[in-house]
Image (cartoon, grey):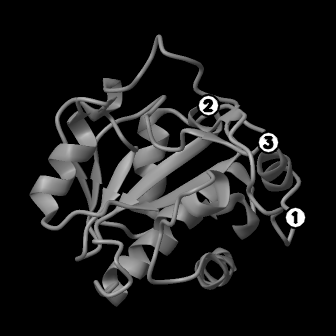
């Protein structure tokens, strides 16, 4: 458990990890403050967007939609590996998930329990990255994008002193979710582990 880093430390951590970062509007102050807490933080959730087109994806994740106001994450990771920062603080990305999973993330357990409940507000506890992909299992994940996802997760873990076990997929947190689809979270955690070395 840790207090969230400041927006300035967040962008610095991403840049220090070698990422190309684009600041979208007043991302530092765009959040869901007043709709629940932000922190203590315990990990990073990786999502896919089920969208096509970087600008459209960034706009959606920044503004949200009629049923779910934005920001829908902290950063959007495009196909080319660019990270677009769309919000900071509480964001509508993780939703309600499984408290057993949260305990496992906090303890950095090697194996996560099977997700079967939605009883805990994940927007309090997790940084979130939406990754541009249709999520159909066929849309490719370019190496530049996978590398950027790895670097973004590693940057946060490095700052907080976490291991790769603090990085989870939305499908590991919330019942009924499938994202990210097209690579396994175990393979991503392996990449994060290597990056943190």
Q: CA distance from mark 3 to mark 2?
A: 12 Å
Q: Is residue 43 left or right of residue 156?
A: right
Determine the image quadrant of residue 197.
Answer: bottom right
Name the element at disc 2.
helix
- Quarter of the image with the N terminus is top right
Pointer 3 with pointer 1, Cβ within 8 A: no
Q: Is residue 179 left or right of residue 54?
A: right
Q: Earlier in the sequence, mark 3 or mark 2?
A: 3
- SS under mark 1: loop
At a point 47% along the width and 10% down the height, the residue shown is 34
Residue 150 position, x and y percent, is: 51, 73
- First along the sequence among labels 2 and 1: 1
Q: Is residue 181 above or below residue 156?
A: below
According to the picture, the residue beneath numbered tag 2 turns out to be 124
Residue hosting label 3: 99
Nearer to us: label 3 or label 2? 3
Q: Nearer the viewer, residue 64 or 163?
A: 64
Residue 103 appears in view: yes
- Label 3: state its secondary structure: helix
Classify mark 2: residues with Cα within 10 Å, few (<14), some (14-19) or many (20+): many
Question: Residue drawn 45% across and 70% down?
Answer: 149
Pointer 1 residue: 109
Around disc 1, counting alpha carbons within 10 Å, would you say few (fewer than 14), some (14 to 19), or many (20 or more)? few
Asked if residue 183 is positioned above or below residue 26 in the image, the reply reads: below
Vertical side of 126 occupied by 153: above or below: below
At which x and y percent is residue 118? Answer: 68, 40
Mark seen at residue 191: none
Q: Position of residue 111 (x, y in %)?
A: 84, 71
Query: Residue 86, position in %: x, y?
Result: 28, 41
Residue at the image point whose x is 58% and y is 79% from the top? 188
């Amino acid at each position: 458990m840790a207090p969230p880093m400041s927006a300035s430390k967040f962008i610095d951590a991403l840049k220090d990890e070698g990422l190309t970062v684009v600041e979208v509007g007043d991302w530092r102050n765009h959040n869901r403050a007043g709709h629940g807490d932000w922190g203590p933080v315990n990990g990073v959730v990786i999502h896919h967007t089920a969208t096509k087109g970087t600008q459209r994806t960034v706009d959606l994740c920044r503004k949200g939609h009629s049923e779910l106001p934005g920001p829908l994450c902290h950063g959007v990771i495009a196909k080319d590996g660019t990270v677009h920062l769309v919000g900071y603080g509480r964001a509508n990305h993780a939703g309600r998930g499984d408290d057993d999973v949260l305990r496992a993330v906090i303890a950095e357990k090697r194996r996560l329990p099977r997700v079967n409940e939605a009883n805990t507000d994940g927007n309090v506890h997790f940084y979130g990255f939406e990754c541009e992909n249709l999520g159909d299992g066929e849309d490719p994940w370019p190496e530049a994008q996978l590398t950027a996802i790895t670097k973004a997760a590693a940057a946060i873990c490095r700052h907080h002193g976490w291991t790769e076990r603090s990085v989870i997929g939305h499908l590991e947190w919330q019942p009924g979710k499938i994202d990210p689809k097209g690579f396994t979270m175990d393979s991503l955690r392996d990449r994060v582990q290597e990056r943190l070395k």
